[in-house]
Image (cartoon, rainbow, N blue to C red):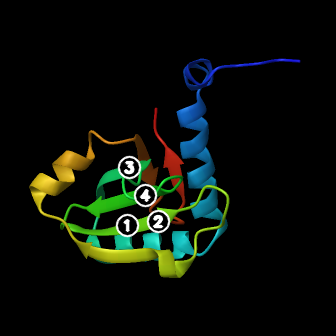
């Protein structure tokens, strides 16, 4: 039997695995369609982050902000496909967008199909 501690799991990529599961849930649903439309209508993505949601244990947020300051936030349960009702569009000022860059894992959005990928 193998026993591992939480710090050991984290060192082996536990946080990365959670972020990847979240991205997989985003890409499995209809979210890429909305993300593609966001990019086409509002311009290039300036910030894309997958990070823990501070007020809900076990959930993550995908936050995507375009250069025009319009963005999308999606609440992600890493064990469920993302639903459209878990996504909202809103404006972000430059300060808020800059603060996001220190949270969680960086990601990118494909302009071609709206899919999300983690960035190393």
Q: Residue furthest right?
A: 1
Residue 8 location, quadrant: top right
Query: Residue under circle 2?
Result: 75
Question: CB of mark 3 within 8 Å of CB of mark 4?
Answer: yes
Q: Is residue 15 above or below residue 107?
A: above
Name the N-terminal-most of marks 4 and 2.
Answer: 4
User: Local crowd at mark 4 within 10 Å, few (<14), some, or many (≥20)?
Assistant: many
Name the N-terminal-most of marks 2 and 3.
Answer: 3
Q: Is residue 28 above or below residue 11?
A: below
Q: Closer to the camera: disc 2 or disc 1?
A: 2
In the figure, is residue 77 to the left or right of 45?
right
Q: Which mark is residue 49?
A: 3
Residue 115 x/y as whole percent: 54, 60
Name the N-terminal-most of marks 4 and 1.
Answer: 4
User: Local crowd at mark 1 within 10 Å, few (<14), some, or many (≥20)?
Assistant: some
Q: CA distance from mark 2 to mark 1?
A: 7 Å
Q: CA distance from mark 2 to mark 3?
A: 12 Å
Who's the residue at 62% across and 24% down the image? 9
Q: Which mark is residue 73?
A: 1
Question: CB of mark 4 within 8 Å of CB of mark 2?
Answer: yes
Query: Residue under circle 4?
Result: 61
Q: Which mark is residue 26?
A: none
Question: CB of mark 4 within 8 Å of CB of mark 1?
Answer: yes
Question: CB of mark 2 within 8 Å of CB of mark 1?
Answer: yes
Question: CB of mark 2 within 8 Å of CB of mark 3?
Answer: no
Q: CA distance from mark 4 to mark 1?
A: 7 Å
């Amino acid at each position: 039997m193998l026993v591992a501690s939480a710090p050991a799991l984290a060192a082996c990529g536990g946080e990365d695995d959670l972020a990847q599961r979240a991205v997989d849930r985003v890409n499995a649903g209809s979210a890429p369609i909305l993300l593609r439309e966001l990019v086409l209508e509002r311009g290039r993505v300036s910030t894309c982050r997958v990070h823990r949601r501070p007020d809900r244990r076990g959930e993550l947020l995908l936050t995507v902000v375009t250069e025009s300051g319009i963005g999308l936030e999606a609440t992600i349960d890493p064990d469920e496909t993302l639903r459209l009702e878990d996504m909202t569009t809103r404006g972000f000022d430059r300060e808020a967008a800059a603060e996001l860059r220190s949270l969680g894992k960086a990601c990118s959005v494909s302009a071609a199909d709206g899919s999300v990928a983690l960035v190393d």
